[in-house]
Amino acid sequence: MENSHADQGINSAAGDTPAVATVLLVEDNEDNILTVADYLTFKNYRVVIARNGRECLEMAVSSAADIILMDIQMPELDGLEAIRRLRRMPGWNRKPIVALTAMAMAGDRERCLAAGANYYMSKPVSLRELTAVIESFLQNTHSV
Ligand code: MN
């Protein structure tokens, strides 16, 4: 499992059409990974998967991701700490990070934004809404 790291977790966009953008999905729940990755791949995104915050920090650079979808509750390194560390990394001080949390506790949104997330969504997320959020952030990034 350790060896196949590079091949694992990368869904290429369907067909010959170039991918719209690369989304780094950071999530430890396999059902959520499948649901979100399949949908975004269908929407022609290149989806790269990290399964905890530590993997995310490695892949944030190596995957050339344009945006990160960050689960908060994860083993090894949680999403809040991963966001804080990303914001100190070259290239990630301004790129969009969307926090996704199932905690649904008062103050979640504020904690995520204070850590450096651009946006917060509580699970279960609507895939259409999630895609709309991704599109709006990528348009903002590219229109400058
Ligand atoms: Mn989780």
Image (cartoon, rainbow, N blue to C red):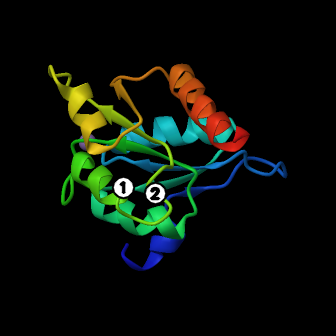
Quadrant housing the C terminus: top right
Query: x, y percentage for residue 48?
Result: 52, 55
Query: x, y percentage for residue 130?
Result: 51, 27
Query: x, y percentage for residue 132?
Result: 59, 24
Residue sitting nearer the eye, 108 or 18: 108
What's under tag 1, amino acid-wise?
Arg
Answer with left or right where residue 132 lies relative to residue 55: right
| Figure quadrant, ligand 1 | top left
What label sits on residue 92 in the rendered view?
Answer: 2
Q: Which residue is mark 1?
A: 87
* Crowdedness near tag 1: few (<14), some (14–19) or many (≥20) residues, C-alpha within 10 Å: some
Which residue is at a point 36% across and 76% down the rendered structure image?
2
Which residue is at a point 70% across and 49% down the rendered structure image?
13
Vertical placement of 65 versus 32: above or below?
below
Residue sitting nearer the eye, 135 or 144: 144
The alpha-carbon separation of the residues under discs 1 and 2 comes to: 6 Å
Which residue is at a point 26% across and 26% down the rendered structure image?
109
Label 1 CB sits under 8 Å from any ligand 1 atom: no
Which callout, 1 or 2, points at the residue further toward the start of the chain? Answer: 1
* Residue 122 location, quadrant: top left
Q: Are circles 1 and 2 on residues that touch, CB within 8 Å?
A: yes
What's under tag 2, amino acid-wise?
Trp
Task: Indicate the secondary structure of the residue bearing disc 2.
Answer: loop
